[in-house]
Structures are given as C-alpha cells and as structure tokens.
Amino acid sequence: MDFFENQWSTYKTIVQHDFMHHRALVGSVEQVLKHYFNSAPAGHRPHFVDLGCGDADPLAAVLRDLPLGSLLGMDQASSVLPLAAKALGEVPYPCDWIQADLLEWATAATPQTNPVDILYSSFAIHHLDGKSQEAFLAGARRKISPSGIFLWADIFREPGETVDDFRLRYTQRMTNLWGTALELQQLAHACFHVSNFDLPADREAIGTTARNQGWTLSWIWAGPDKAEALALLTPA
C-alpha cells in the first residue's frame, strides 16, 4: 500500500522503461485473449475481473477492444482507481472500479452477481504468503465459470529457490539496471519493498497447489530474468 500510495511515480517509471517486461507480458496476455474469443460461442460477452488493477495501464489498450459484458477492476489503493477509469476511457460495456482486497474478494462467501469468465491479476498476488495464495486459488476457483480462464501475471521463484535468495537476486538486478532511470531514493524504496513484502511463489510448487485447488496451470510466457512470468489457469 505504501509503495503504490506514496511512490506511484516510481512504479510508473519502472513500467515506462519496461524494467519488468510489461510489453512482452501484455502481448502474451493479448494473444491468450484472442484465442479465448476466437473459441468462444458467438455472442458471448464475458465478465472480466482485474484484481490489483492499478491504473489499468498498459492493459487498457487491450481491454478497449474486447467485446466484454462487464468489467470489474479492484485495487487496495483507492487513489489509482480514477486513473484506471481515465486510462480505459469510454467503452461499450459497464465498468466498476472498487477498493478491495483480492484475498477477501476471493474468499468471500457472498454469491457473484455475474460468473467470472476472465480473471486477471498482474503483480499483486505475490504479496500474499503461501497459505494465503492457496486460499486465494481455492476461492477464485469457486468464482470462475466452468469455461473461464485466469491469467496470472507475476514474479515467481525458480524451482527450489528460497524467498530470500529470490529477493537478493532481484534487488541486485534492480540496483544494476534500474538506477539508470530511478533516483537513489526511489531505487532504495523499491528495493526495500521487494526485500520486505514480496513473497513470490515457487513455479513448480504453485503448479501443485493450483492442481490441488481444482485448476490446470500452464506457463504461457516467461521473462528473460527468470522472475516475471504469465500463467494460464483453467478449471480442471
């Protein structure tokens, strides 16, 4: 929350310089969505939920062209929600932007107004610990429609890599490469955030966890730094 509320300019600089490979990631998301719509029944208007939507950039350009039935974007940082609405602009489907916790949303017992056809989350779930990630996957499985898809974009550990080793490797990469665009204070804050709050899942272990919670998981894209990756989960 502190990172997004007080250091939003840092995050925007990271995205603009593609330090976390957002361009390739969003390109892969777009390809999966094209396949989804090409395979969907004629006239299908899916309900799209974006967990941890931020300011909806750079996904906004993709969302504008989708024949959605509705869009729900949620984030813990309320200050980014007007930015998300502005980034998306006018679209021919209803949109709601709400402040909410993604784990609470997933585990809430209240029934869904619409079944979730497309669930998307980008660089948010890694803030949950292992038990909470398991609970999230179980809850999200109950909310997804039988033919739905879950696109999980995030940072992940290599099989067998510890959280501490990942944090060290990632902050070394940040220090070596990101300092060309970030001020020293911004870089220090970003490294502090990773070192104290990031809890990325082990790529191999999370596949087992997902299967145990009723998902089939496949890896669609992986960045060159063995950190950022995109998983596609479908109901088993």
Image: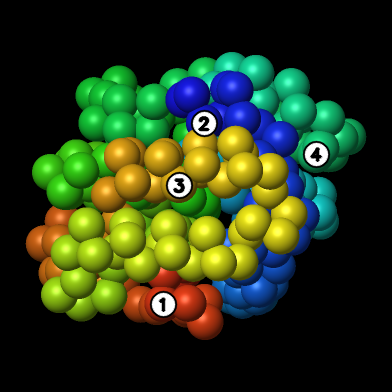
Q: What label does residue 88 carry, if any? A: 4
**Disc 2 marks which residue?**
3
**Mark 1 vs mark 3: which is more N-terminal?**
3
Question: Under tag 3, what secondary structure?
Answer: helix
> Gap in Å between the C-alphas at discs 1 and 3?
18 Å
> Gap in Å between the C-alphas at discs 2 and 3?
11 Å
Query: CB under 8 Å between callouts 1 and 4?
Result: no
**Disc 1 marks which residue?**
226
Residue 91: x and y, percent?
A: 84, 39
Q: Where the C terminus falls, by quadrant?
A: bottom left
**Mark 2 vs mark 4: which is more N-terminal?**
2
Residue 152: x and y, percent?
A: 43, 58
**Disc 3 marks which residue?**
191
> Gap in Å between the C-alphas at discs 3 and 4?
30 Å
Q: Nearer the viewer, mark 2 or mark 4?
A: 2
Q: What label does residue 39 carry, if any? A: none
Amino acid under label 3?
A: Cys
In the figure, is residue 176 to the left or right of 166? right
**Mark 1 vs mark 2: which is more N-terminal?**
2
Q: What residue is drawn where x is 55% and y is 67%?
A: 176
Q: What residue is drawn where x is 68% and y is 43%?
A: 183
Amino acid under label 4?
A: Leu
Q: Nearer the viewer, mark 1 or mark 4?
A: 1
Question: Under tag 1, what secondary structure?
Answer: loop
Using the rendered image of the protein, determine whether residue 4 is visible from the camera's viewpoint. yes
* Label 3 crowd bin: few (<14), some (14–19), many (20+), radius 10 Å: many
Question: Under tag 4, what secondary structure?
Answer: helix
In the figure, is residue 8 to the left or right of 163? right
Q: Using the image, determine if residue 153 lies above or below residue 134.
A: below
Q: Toward which corner of the image does residue 40 lie, by quadrant?
A: bottom right
**Mark 1 vs mark 4: which is more N-terminal?**
4
Residue 182: x and y, percent?
A: 68, 48
